[in-house]
Image: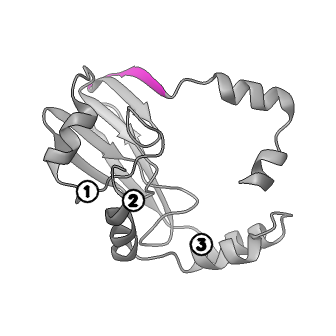
Amino acid sequence: MRWTAQQLYPEYERLLASWPKTFRVEIPGLGGVLFCHATPRNENECFTRLTPEDRLLPVFEGLTAPVVVCGHTHMQFDRTIARIRVVNAGSVGMPFGESGADWLLLGPAVQLQHTSYDFRRAAARIRDTNYPQAHDFAERYVLQPPSEGEMLEVFTRVELR
């Protein structure tokens, strides 16, 4: 993280710091969609498709958006918590589970998507950067990402802390 922060120009730091933690957009067919990184109340909280609903009710209570799109755990899911549809878009560059790019298409429906690409070429391009952990990242997250089961186990131990 320190290396990534050092890559930012000061004007970009100010811009990123000014962004809201959540953002609501009207999407035809879905209505108001609330976007957040992890949960609407905390950008670092973890939960998964396996987290019991009763533990999640306090996280989503009081929201008026019918759909919430989150990420953070890099694993796609589509579930309902109380009356709110909660969707995790997954991750394009660091998915857990099957190699490839996980993404989300919104409007008028919710469509979880997965796209394969040339993993070896992508890993080579990552290794060619000056990112200090490029070789490890290319191997562990592009060529041989952790399984969904492994990551569900990890996130279950730290969920909603």
Instruction: Quickly name the residue at label 3.
Output: 142
Q: CA distance from mark 1 to mark 2?
A: 9 Å
Report x, y in % for residue 24: 41, 21
Residue at 27% in and 23% down: 65
Q: CA distance from mark 3 to mark 1?
A: 23 Å
Q: Amino acid at mark 1?
A: Arg
Name the mark on residue 49: 1
Residue at 43% in and 37% down: 42
**Circles 1, 2 touching at the beta carbon (< 8 Å):** yes
Instruction: Quickly name the residue at label 2.
Output: 75
Q: Earlier in the sequence, mark 1 or mark 2?
A: 1
Q: Quadrant of residue 39?
A: top left
Question: In terms of secondary structure, where does tag 1 sit?
Answer: loop
* Main SS class of the magenta portion in the image: strand
In reply to whether residue 25 is colored magenta, the answer given is yes
Mark nearest the camera among 3 and 2 is 2
Residue at 34% in and 65% down: 157
Left or right? Give the position of 24 relative to 131. left
